[in-house]
Image (cartoon, rainbow, N blue to C red):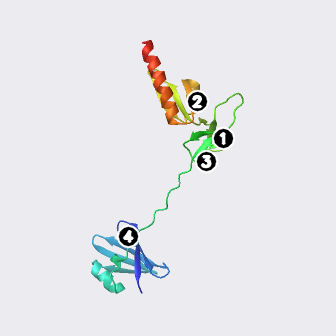
Amino acid sequence: MTVKLKPITENSWLVLGDTDDTRIGLLTEIRDNYILMVKGEKKQFFNRKEVNKYFKEDIFNNVVQPTEPEEVKKDYYINGYPVEFDNPHEVILKGNKLPLFSKKATSEVYYSAGHYCLHFPKNWMPAFCPKLSTLETYQYVGPFKTQLEMYSQLTKLRKEKNSRK
């Protein structure tokens, strides 16, 4: 019977049957010793050679590399403006025309979708999906649908501010 090892950590493996990936046990390396736990039994080996002798093959050559699931990045938008959070919940406040959303349906913390130029006391700064409370506190220009549009406007605002000095 051919056996495979599937890494769990740097020095522990699931021992799997080759044909149908049935779990045979757990193999752990502790200070150059190996412990195999199989169906309530615990076997100790003093080196890799003894482990291989037990399985009648070099199982360390049969280490299965785990396949990382490919992370699919979804893009989210509120009224055509990009959002940096997964599954945003659109929020509509009477008298407010900003593309607002919250991270959770029950949240009372609101964010505004898109890119913005915010005027802090010393300078204009870029912002992406700022909190509504920030937009209510500071002067802003936006929203912009792309970072390029926002940076173009930010450059103009900074030049205008510097020319007034």
Quarter residue 59 falls in: bottom left
Q: Is residue 140 visible?
A: yes
Residue of label 1: 90
Dot 2, crowdedness within 10 Å: few (<14), some or many (≥20)? few
Circle 4 SS class: strand
Residue of label 2: 133
Looking at the picture, which amino acid does disc 3 mark? Asn
Label 4, label 3: how far apart the Cα atoms are:
36 Å
Q: Is residue 58 above or below residue 151?
A: below
Quarter residue 129 falls in: top right
Residue of label 4: 12
Q: Nearer the viewer, residue 146 or 126?
A: 146
Label 1, label 2: how far apart the Cα atoms are:
16 Å
Residue 87: which numbered mark, if any? 3
Quarter that holds the C terminus: top left
Mark 4 / mark 2, whichever is N-terminal? 4
Dot 4, crowdedness within 10 Å: few (<14), some or many (≥20)? some
Count of marks overlaid on the render: 4
Looking at the picture, which amino acid does disc 2 mark? Ser
Residue that protrudes farthest toward the top in the picture = 165
Say if mark 1 contacts mark 3, CB within 8 Å. no
Mark 3 / mark 2, whichever is N-terminal? 3
Residue at the spot 40% in from the left edge and 75% down from the top edge: 5
Label 4, label 2: how far apart the Cα atoms are:
49 Å
Dot 1, crowdedness within 10 Å: few (<14), some or many (≥20)? some
Looking at the picture, which amino acid does disc 4 mark? Ser
* Percent x, y of residue 147: 50, 36
Mark 1 / mark 2, whichever is N-terminal? 1
Say if mark 4 contacts mark 3, CB within 8 Å. no
Mark 4 / mark 3, whichever is N-terminal? 4
